[in-house]
Image: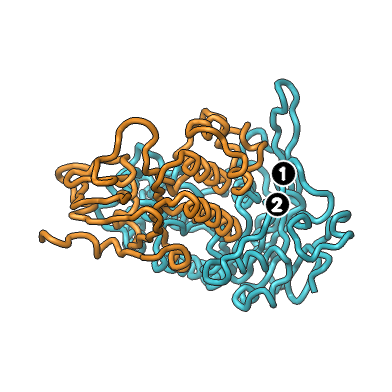
Chain colours: A orange, B cyan
Amino acid sequence: MCLKAKDISFRYAKHQSWIVQNLNFCVEQGTCVGLSAPSGAGKSTLAMLLAGYLTPVEGEILLNEKPLSKKGICPVQLIYQHPEQTVNPRWRLRKVLEESGQISEELLAALGIESAWLGRFPQELSGGELQRFCVARALMSGAPFLICDEISTMLDAITQAQIWHVVCDEAKKRNMGIVVITHNYHLARHLCSQIYDLHKIQNTEKI
Amino acid sequence: MDNKQNPPILEVDNLSISFQMYDGRFDQKALQIISELNIKIYAGEILAIAGSSGSGKSLLASAILGILPNNATVTGKMCYNGQMLTPKLQKRLRGTEIALVPQSVDFLDPLMQVGTQADGHKKPFPTQKRRRFFQRFGLPSGIEKCYPFQLSGGMARRVLVSTALIADAQLIIADEPTPGMGLEQALDTLKMFREMADDKKAVILITHDIDLAFAVADRIAVFYAGTIVETANAHDFQIGPVALRHPYSKALWRALPQNEFESIAGVQPYAGNLPKGCLFAPRCKCKTPRCMQESPPLRMLRGGEVRCFCAK
């Protein structure tokens, strides 16, 4: 199975300039690839396009040569760079996790989530603690592809290592495909088999 | 390490912060998040605060500015330029003398163009100055007319940083100013903080990018579970575990992807459930029976401070 972006272009409005243009990109299941580019180059936009939060203006996103299904849990899960914006502020965290299925105690322990946190509201946890919930939520959904958009910048180095070890172990076990977006070059080199430069995979054909 | 001639610009003495929380339907309990914390910061220096996420680093920033939520109780003493920091003084100082670079890009008003909100309330609007900052940060000129949702994470961060720098404050508290920025921009931002510090201002830099922090900071304070376990010269972090004092700082250094990318077992203790002795003892490899019983006091060691019985 592979997740493919085929000639995609995106802009928010007709009078604005393109954020992503003629981009071609492909991730195989079971591999971990990195994406790097300066801030504001469209990395997060690409992440949202791949995960189906935005629809490309031109081109298409294909999973196994078919468009992403609109029903059920999306097979491409995005972990966003601002965890506080991706959890419902009026839900306790137990409910946030239950949204993606059966809570796996084992996974929670591996991510270092205390059971007491499940009864709290998002504003009562720190950014790093919330991000663990977002990682748990994405992994519990059973999706075969994961887009990690700067998921560990708000974490200390020890927690960063801890969470990436969990994600990588889980990915290996379930043969998942992972896209890692990060500014940390050392981290990308550690995790990814290949690192793409966003500028190099765009504008390849028509200019 | 201390430059004794000048008094510190900010002195935090024995600070504790606790929160009132509901425990069950009717009972309330106090949850102590920060305990017995001491820091001093002098004009002309950058103090980096590193450490575990959820250890209370951002709360310290809120406490200094007096913007904690209502259910928080603060004990201990804070002095700014020798004056006690009272709520009234905090209200007067924040935004003018003490500026904050907030941690989350949520702090931007979603319904306001970023140029206008970076100008702030000061009249006349410092538009020219703000444009210089935006240019310096490499933000294209059209950005000032954009709304926060139209910006990338790194751009929004740079807007936040310029918002704080425009105030021309004496003390800048930067709460994770660099995530989402590329390496060059991050270094450039830190270089600007360095320039501010060289200009006799003081900067508290809360960050997880310790590899970047030790390049610009003078001292690094390491937080764990609501207290400072070690204060070291930035140089010690450059050398590595041999020069560091506390086992947690050593583990932090080892966990960096460019070093060993090695995590340690366990999690930081939960605030309501702190261990009896040393806070790090449950995860520490070199703990002794004494560490499980007594909480180690802060002591001087090799030009730094450490909270550990075993550090040599």
When asked about the image quadrant of residue B221, the answer is: bottom right
Query: Label 2: chain?
Result: B
Image position of B161 (left or right of B208) = left
Q: Among all residues in the image, which is located at the extreme left?
A: A207
Q: Position of residue B218 (x, y in %)?
A: 60, 71
Image position of A120 (left or right of A5) = right
* Residue A70 can be seen, yes or no: yes
Residues at marks 2 and 1, common chain? yes
When asked about the image quadrant of residue A49, the answer is: top left
Q: In this orientation, which residue lies closer to the viewer: A62 or A131?
A: A62
Q: Position of residue B299 (x, y in %)?
A: 81, 66
The residue type indicated by label 1 comes to Ala
Q: Position of residue B29 (x, y in %)?
A: 75, 32
- Report how far apart the C-alphas of labels 2 and 1 lie in the structure: 7 Å
- Label 2 or label 1, whichever comes before in sequence order: 2
Q: Which mark is residue B271?
A: 1
Q: In this orientation, which residue lies closer to the viewer: B67 or B281?
A: B281
At a point 47% along the width and 42% down the height, the residue shown is A138
Helix, strand or loop status at disc 2: loop
Q: Which mark is residue A122?
A: none
Q: Which mark is residue B225?
A: 2
At a point 46% along the width and 43% down the height, the residue shown is B107
When asked about the image quadrant of residue B295, the answer is: bottom right
At a point 34% along the width and 51% down the height, the residue shown is A44
Q: Among all residues in the image, which is located at the extreme top?
A: B26
Q: Position of residue A165 (x, y in %)?
A: 55, 57
